[in-house]
Every structure is written in C-alpha cells, then in structure tokens.
C-alpha cells in the first residue's frame, strides 16, 4: 500500500506519496494563502488524476495540521517527531537541524542530548519575514537572493519580526542605501534571529542540516548561516518534504481512498465566535450619510485644473510612499501625486518634475519644501528650498481644514503620529515606536496575505455582520488569531472589519495610551493614507464617540503642509532644479565605512550633479566636512572621557591581573572597582567600549533573545576578557545599588543584579582555567561591604591582609564619590551656560550603561547638533526631595528617573526630558508611564526613544526634531 504524508504548514502545503519500495512517487509544494481546505481539495483532485482511486495509508502533520486532522478524524504526527524520523533515515550522522518555514522556525539538537527549540508567536526570521522584506524592495524572494549575492557590505537590520524590520529597512532605502547591501542585511537578520532567538546559548556545532523552503530556495541565506556559524551546512535534495516524509513513514496512517480523504478534508466547523465587535454600518443608507459628511469637510479647498501665476511645491518623502502637490496662494491644490516609493524616492520626484515642466513650460514655482523620512535626500538631490519636520507639516495642513483643531492623528504606512494642540501650538506629541503595527503596512500585509489589494480589502468590512475581535496586537502576533478565525469559519468581511478596529485600538491604547478615548480632543482632524479606508475611519469615530474631519486629501497632508509652509516663507523664487537642471541630473550611490573616529559608521554617499552630496549613516559631523564644535556640552561624551581614564592602565609584570567587563553597572561603578583592585595591588584590565564586533563574539552564548541589548553585550565583553587571559574575571552579583535616599528601597533591576549568574551558566569559557568571581556584594554600607569582601578575598586571595583591604575600600568609596561629584559639577556648569546662552537643555535619561556608544547610537551627538545641551538624569537627581509616586519607588535607577522628571517639572529653566528605553526592558514598562505622568502634570513634553542593536537614526531624528518643534512653540 502506498503511504501519503501531508504536511500542512503555516503558509504552505506539502504532500509526499511513497511507493512500496519507499521511493518518492509524487511530491508537491504549494502555498495555500490561508485557504487550506481549497488548496487541499485541489491537491486531492490532482492525486486522483494520477493515482485514480487507490487506497493510501494517510498521516497528517504540520503546524496547521492538528486541528484539521482532529476535525477530519485522521491520524496526526507532531511535526518535530516526523522531521526527526526523516532525518534519521536520510542523514543519520546529523548533529543539528535548522529548519525555516513560512511562519515557523526550529532547531533540533540531535547529538549531545536531544533538544528542540521552536519559535513562539513571533514569525521573525522565517519565510514570512523574508516575503515581507522582499515586497518592501519590490522584488521576489529569488530576486532578493540574487541581490544579496552582489553585496558590498551588510546593512544592520533588526533580527525581529518583519514589522519591526521595516522600520530599519525603510530609512535605509530613503537614504539611498544599495538594495544589494540591504538584501544581505535581511538574510543576516534571519541568521541572528535564529542563532540568538532559538539556539539560546547552546552552540551549533558539528554537521548541520538545512531544511525548509527559505533555506532550500535561497542559497545566499545558507551562505549567511555558514558564515555566522563558521560551518558548511548541507541542504538535501528533498529539504522541502522532510516533515511529510516523516509523517508517511511514521506507521500511524489510516487506510483511505482518495475520495474518502477528499471528503474528510472538506469537513469544516460552523463559525461560532461569541465575541465580536459591533458592525461598522447597519445598512447602505447609514454608510452613504457618513460618506457625504466627510466629503463636505473639504468643500472649501478645491483641486485646480491649471496652475496659477505662482505655485508652491510640497514633497513628502514618506516611509513607504512619495507624495507631491502644488498649491496656489489660496491653498487650492494642483497636480497631486501619490505613489509607493519603490525603495528610492529620487526617480519618482524627478519624473514628476520633468512631466510638470513639460506640460507647463511657463510654470513659476515660487517656493518649495520637503518633509518625511527622505527629507534630506530629496532636499539635496533637487535643491529644495526648505526642510520641515513631519509634525509641523501635518499641523500646518490640518489648520487649513479646521483652524481650531486641538488633536491630530496621522496614520501612515509605517508611522502613527498624534499631537495635541494648545493655544495654537503643538503641545504634546506621540509617535509609535520601532513597531509599525496598526499602520498602513499592517493592513497592507494582511490584504496581501489574503490575496487582496489594499483598496479591495478596504471595502470588504463595511457591512460585516460580526467583525472579529482581534485586540491591538502586532501583525505577526495577530496572524494566529486571524488563522484561527478562518478555521472557525469567519468570513473575510468579518476579518477585514476586525483588523480595521484593531488599527484604531492600537493607535489609541498603545501609542497615545489614553485612559479614556472619548477625552482626546474635541476638534479632531485625521489624516494619512490609512484613513482613506472608511472602515478604519468609522471604527475610530465609534471608539471615541465623536465625529471627526477627514480631509479629502488625507494621504497628501504632509506634502500639502510642506507646500503651505513654502508659501508662508517664500522669497518669490525657488532654488529647486529647473527643466535644464533635471535634464542634466545624475545620481550615484556609494557605500563606505568612515574611519574618522571610533564609531566606524557605515555610510551611504549619494552624489548628485552639480557636486551636491548627501551622506547618510553618520553619527557625527566629520564625514560631512563640517567644523567640529569646539566644546559640545554633552555629559554623555564627558562620562565616556572620564571612564576612559580607568580603561587603559599600563600593566606591571609583577602584578596579577583582574578583568572587568565594561557593561551594565560598570558604567557607574568602574571608578570604584578600578580604585579597589588597583589599591589591592592588581593590574586592572577593562574590556573596551562595545561595538558590533564585540557583540558577535558572544552572540552564540546568549540564552534568551528577550534580554535587553545591554545585557546581551556582556557576553561579548566576557569573551574579550577570556581572549586576553587575565588571572581572574570579576563581576559581582549586586541585589542592591548605592543608597541615595530617593525611594523606599535601592534595588538594582534583576538583569543588572544577577546577570553574572546567567554568564556563569551559559558561557563555556568561564568553566575553564580563568576563575570567575561573581560573589554577592552590596556597596550600600561601607563597613558591611568591607566585612563581606574580607570573606570573598580570603577564599581567593588569602594573602591580602586587613590593612590593605581597609585602605582599598576607603580608596574605592572616595574615588566613586569624586566621580559622582565631577559629573554633577559638569552638569551644573552646563545648566548655567545654557541659561546664559538661552539654549534648551535635554536630560537624556536612562541607565548608566546608556552611555555606551554602541547602545545609545550617538543620540547625544544628534541632540547637540540640533543645538541642545545634554545632561544625564543622575547629574540632577539630587536636586529634588523625595516625593510620593504612583508606583512603588524601590529601584535606584528608576528613582533617579523620577527625581529628574520632578526637577524638570518644577524648574523654570528650559529643561526637557528624553527617555532612552532598551527593547526587552520589562521594568521600563513601569518607568515610562510614571515619568510621562510626572512631566505631563506640569505641562512638559515627554519623549521616549526605544533603542537596541539597530543603529539607523532616521526615525529618531524625526522624533527629536518634532520635540524641538514643540520646544520652539512653547517659547
């Protein structure tokens, strides 16, 4: 009897038929686009044509196969077991299996004790991730592979889900980065996600077998794995079918004819979801009234048939689209343009201008302005007069439709921007973080996955009877809920309506974080391409209980605001390239690494005709040829300078060497420990400031991908120290920080407190000849510390006497106090200078380790380049008395944040807070809300920037420029 194995995966269906002699007689690999019953029925029809109505031993497997098998009454084999069976038959000497599927990824460790690692709800690093990234570059996955083969460098891209990674890829595209380099970065992101997220500290060694569609079809992805793992893996001929082969060979099959199998698979349960959202429209008449009301909101502004004497050009080079529009002095629009940017906005803008000049040779452009992610690129390429930050552009446009607007919500392709207006100025703003869930790309992704265009999908949910309740999670997390609803029988209309509701809830409750959606404002304008979707607009009005204004030109509001801005500031003649300039226009892109400082930034150099250049990727002004500030008032840079003095000792041959890893709390306590060990008679070897190379040194020992980036870096620091062979490595566990009297206790966060234990248990090098001292210590009480340290040293260095230890302890506390006071003195000096020169002061608040340039990515330098003075939260946290907070104030780092926020709230000076938050920091879910509430109670803006290993600063720049626009309006 022939055996049939059916592997129903998250995105594909694989089928294998084995003959009597165990050879493959038939195999098929097909995408099902979430239409599993229909795809399976089509497959069975093909099987019946080939095998007529033979009887088969049938077994089902796969991530989406269990529910179908249960409903159909067919045997099911867990996919890992099936895959293991197939591997043992085809390649019995395999040590590790790496399999990537559509939305699933797994690693099987077969030697040294069987272990399976599999992704959870996040589809980062899978075929779905690669599909999304390829779509972003407007290529197929195969073409993405071909691009990666021609790379010159590797762009750093988030090794997370596709929605996060878009936030890294899109700025690279807008800056003109080579597609080949981005493609290579995408594949390395997949590798990093797999190694860091799944291997979780267990080394991938020995013979590696690559399975699954992405690894089978994309040889450059395999090469990326080989490069990172320092191995040469094997991808077998039938890599696509191992789960199906294992299912067929499992011996658990049920005997069925193909006709009976087809009937079993067509069984489908009735949709019984009891929890659903309210329908958006009761009937067509209600929808028609809604549509007419929103059309009336734009009646005062019309679209011109021909240009007027003087026209003003606005360009919005957005994250995924390019928008251009001209307006006359009355604000009427002419020749609006909206199109996907295809990863490079330059050709689109050039084509628009060439056609414009050809159609209207006598056209006079009296002013021009550009906004959006690609602002600097477009401004340099076409000699545009002005650049304007997005928030100001959108507010300028919104005022044209509602002069008394007090709340604006803009949902674009990758961004959500919300800002409150008070007394005619931007008062507060909220922007989504690195995740673009709930944006236009959110709906676009689902529309494509379900086989619809975005426009078609927008109309489906209007009259859905039971919109699916999906919450406000991100795209990838929501996939499982959508798939489950489909399996339960939800209509595509119900899903489309449910997703529209989710977009709204994400904006209100995840970005704005409003407690009551009905109190966000009275005179509300919504804009952005996403609000052209009537389902989203209706869901928003229903959620807030208020009618809003959606301009007819909602997707063009950024460009329209830029045109109005150009109108307000026009000198009568624009510098934008004329027809001849466009005819001579040339654009070349070159990748290079800057060696002007220790950052070694990866630069993208855009060169245009007329010797114009735009350089992207820099963290300082050196590549731009600008004069360096003589003395930028930057306490982050000052701290780096102060700490560097402890990091470069000349070793003495007659002394033993202690190694200190320069990460986490050593960014605060290095002066203490350096003085302590030096006074004890040791050489002190300190690992360098972090960089990507150091991170990769320890990447394969990281046991959890959910740890924050600063913690992950510690693995690299330990590997660096091990390579330099000190006599001992010292990194103590510290439950408590120093007592500063700011809170009810003085704990360290769990990661800072106990990460030495993680390192000891997961880094094989620490089990070798180099001792690792990670005893539990506390610096809160000097006498208790000395007593505890005496016991620790007695176990390791019994020759150190009490007098030497006592002197070392006194020297350490004195050195720490001197460092702390120096930091506060510098801050005091900067505050006085800023007040004298009328400069804004930004308190760049976070943790001591955010001083690490690899972690902060030069955000401090960006702030000083914008004209600010930069200080830190610990430099002013002593300037306020303890006060009651809404949360339990028991963590030293948190207490400093709250105290700094309180000082800013009470100060009459131009102080503003920007909080740095590391991805993966769970306790910052508490601090961000508390700091925000302290500042907003005093009418002071709050800005949060989430950071991790990704260094692209496009979105950060927009966020900070938006803050400076708020600061300017508050003058």
Image (cartoon, grey):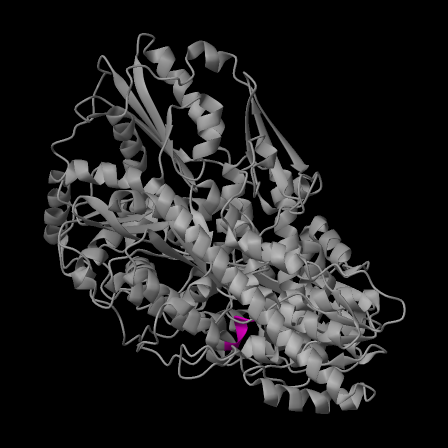
Horizontal and vertical percent position of residue 852: 59, 58
For residue 230, which quarter of the picture? bottom right
Q: Is residue 299 magenta?
A: no
Quarter containing the N terminus: bottom right
Residue 927 as seen in the image, left or right of residue 423: right
Q: In the image, what residue occupies the spot 25% across and 29% down? A: 564
Q: Residue furthest top?
A: 362
Horizontal and vertical percent position of residue 247: 66, 74
Q: In the image, what residue occupies the spot 60% across and 38% down? A: 179
Number of dots carrying numbers: 0
Let me know if residue 8 appears in the view. no
Q: In the image, what residue occupies the spot 82% across and 65% down? A: 723
Say above or below: 114 vs 840: below
**Residue 237 vs residue 411, the one in the foreground:** 411
Q: Residue furthest right?
A: 653
Let me know if residue 202 appears in the view. yes
Residue 588 as seen in the image, left or right of residue 964: right
Horizontal and vertical percent position of residue 953: 51, 46
For residue 566, which quarter of the picture? top left
Q: Is residue 63 magenta?
A: yes
Residue 912 as seen in the image, left or right of residue 851: left
Residues in magenta, as a range: 62-66
Secondary structure character of the magenta stretch overall: loop
Say above or below: 7 vs 136: below
For residue 129, which quarter of the picture? bottom right
Say above or below: 288 vs 785: above
């Amino acid at each position: 009897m022939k055996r049939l194995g059916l592997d129903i995966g998250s995105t594909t269906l694989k089928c294998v038929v084995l003959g009597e002699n165990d050879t493959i007689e038939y195999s098929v690999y097909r995408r099902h686009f979430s239409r599993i019953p229909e795809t399976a029925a089509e497959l069975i029809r093909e099987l019946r044509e080939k095998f007529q109505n033979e009887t088969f031993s049938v077994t089902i497997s796969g991530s989406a196969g269990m529910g179908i098998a249960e409903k159909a009454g067919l045997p099911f084999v867990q996919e890992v077991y099936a895959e293991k069976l197939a591997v043992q038959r085809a390649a019995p000497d395999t040590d590790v299996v790496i399999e990537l599927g559509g939305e699933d990824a797994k690693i099987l460790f077969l030697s040294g004790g069987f272990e399976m690692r599999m992704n959870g709800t996040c589809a980062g690093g899978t075929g779905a991730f690669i599909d999304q990234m390829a779509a972003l570059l407007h290529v197929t996955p195969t073409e993405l592979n071909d691009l990666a083969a021609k790379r010159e460098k590797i762009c750093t891209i988030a090794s997370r889900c596709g929605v996060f990674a878009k936030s890294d890829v899109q700025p690279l595209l807008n800056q003109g980065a080579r597609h080949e380099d981005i493609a290579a970065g995408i594949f390395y992101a997949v590798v990093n996600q797999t190694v860091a997220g799944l291997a979780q500290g267990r080394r991938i060694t020995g013979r590696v077998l690559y399975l699954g569609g992405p690894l089978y079809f994309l040889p450059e992805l395999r090469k990326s794995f080989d490069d990172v793992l320092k191995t040469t893996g094997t991808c077998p001929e039938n890599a696509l079918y191992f789960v199906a082969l294992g299912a067929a060979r499992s011996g658990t099959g049920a005997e069925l004819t193909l006709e009976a199998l087809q009937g079993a698979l067509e069984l489908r349960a009735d949709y019984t979801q009891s929890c659903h959202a309210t329908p958006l429209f009761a009937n067509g008449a209600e929808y028609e009234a809604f549509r007419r009301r929103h059309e009336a909101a734009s009646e005062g502004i019309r679209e011109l048939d021909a240009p007027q004497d003087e026209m003003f050009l606005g360009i919005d080079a957005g994250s995924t689209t390019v928008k251009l529009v001209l307006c006359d002095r009355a604000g009427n629009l002419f020749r609006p343009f909206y199109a996907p940017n295809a990863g490079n906005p330059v050709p689109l803008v050039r084509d628009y201008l060439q056609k414009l000049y050809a159609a209207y040779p006598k056209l006079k452009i009296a002013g021009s302005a550009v906004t959006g992610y690609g602002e600097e690129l477009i401004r340099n390429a076409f000699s545009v007069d002005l650049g304007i930050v997005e928030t100001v552009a959108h507010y300028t446009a919104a005022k044209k439709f509602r002069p008394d607007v007090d709340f604006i919500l803009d949902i674009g392709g990758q961004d959500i921007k919300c800002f409150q207006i008070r007394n005619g100025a931007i008062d507060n703003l909220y922007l989504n973080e690195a995740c673009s869930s709930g944006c236009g790309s959110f709906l676009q992704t689902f529309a494509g996955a379900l086989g619809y265009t975005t426009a078609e999908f927008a109309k489906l949910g209007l009259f859905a009877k039971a919109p699916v309740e999906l919450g406000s999670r991100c795209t990838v997390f929501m996939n499982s809920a959508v798939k489950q609803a489909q399996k339960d029988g939800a209509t595509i209309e119900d899903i489309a309506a449910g997703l529209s509701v989710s977009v709204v809830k994400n904006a209100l409750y995840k970005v704005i974080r409003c407690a009551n959606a009905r109190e966000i404002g009275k005179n509300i304008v919504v804009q952005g391409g996403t609000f052209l979707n009537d389902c989203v607009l209706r869901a928003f009005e229903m959620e807030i209980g208020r009618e809003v204004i959606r301009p007819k030109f909602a997707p063009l509001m950024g460009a329209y605001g830029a045109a109005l801005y150009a109108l307000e500031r026009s000198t009568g003649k624009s510098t934008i390239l004329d027809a001849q300039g466009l005819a001579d226009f040339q654009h070349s892109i070159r990748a290079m690494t800057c060696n002007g400082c220790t950052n070694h930034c990866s630069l993208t150099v855009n060169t245009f005709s007329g010797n114009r250049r735009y350089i992207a990727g820099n963290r300082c002004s050196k590549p731009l040829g600008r004069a360096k500030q003589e003395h930028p008032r930057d306490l982050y840079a000052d701290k780096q300078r102060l700490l560097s003095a402890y990091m470069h000792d000349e070793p003495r041959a007659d002394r033993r060497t202690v190694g200190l890893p320069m990460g986490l709390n050593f960014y605060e306590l290095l002066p203490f420990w350096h003085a302590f060990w030096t006074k004890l008679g040791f050489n002190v070897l300190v690992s360098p400031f972090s960089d990507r190379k150091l991170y990769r040194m320890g990447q394969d020992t990281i046991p959890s991908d959910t740890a924050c980036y600063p913690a992950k870096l510690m693995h690299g620091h330990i590997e660096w120290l091990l390579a330099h062979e000190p006599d001992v490595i010292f990194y103590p566990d510290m439950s408590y920080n120093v007592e500063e009297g700011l809170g009810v206790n003085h704990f360290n966060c769990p990661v800072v407190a106990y990460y030495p234990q993680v390192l000891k248990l997961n880094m094989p090098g620490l089990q070798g000849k180099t001792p690792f001292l990670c005893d539990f210590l506390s610096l809160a009480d000097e006498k208790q510390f000395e007593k505890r340290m005496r016991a620790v040293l007695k176990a390791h260095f019994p020759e150190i006497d009490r007098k030497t230890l006592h002197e070392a302890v006194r020297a350490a506390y004195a050195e720490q106090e001197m460092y702390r006071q120096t930091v506060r003195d510098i801050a005091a000096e900067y505050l006085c200078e800023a007040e004298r020169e009328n400069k804004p002061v930004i308190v760049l608040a976070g943790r001591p380790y955010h001083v690490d340039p690899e972690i902060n990515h030069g955000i401090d330098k960006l702030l000083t380049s914008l004209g600010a003075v930069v200080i830190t939260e610990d430099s002013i946290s002593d300037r306020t008395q303890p006060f009651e907070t809404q949360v339990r104030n028991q963590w030293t780092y948190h207490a400093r944040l709250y105290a700094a926020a309180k000082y800013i709230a009470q100060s009459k000076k131009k102080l503003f807070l920007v909080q740095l938050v590391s991805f993966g920091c769970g306790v910052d879910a508490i601090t961000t809300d508390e700091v925000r509430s302290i500042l907003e109670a005093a009418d002071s803006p709050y800005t949060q920037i989430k950071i991790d290993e990704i260094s692209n600063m496009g979105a950060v720049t927009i966020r900070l420029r938006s803050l400076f626009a708020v600061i300017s309006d508050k003058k």
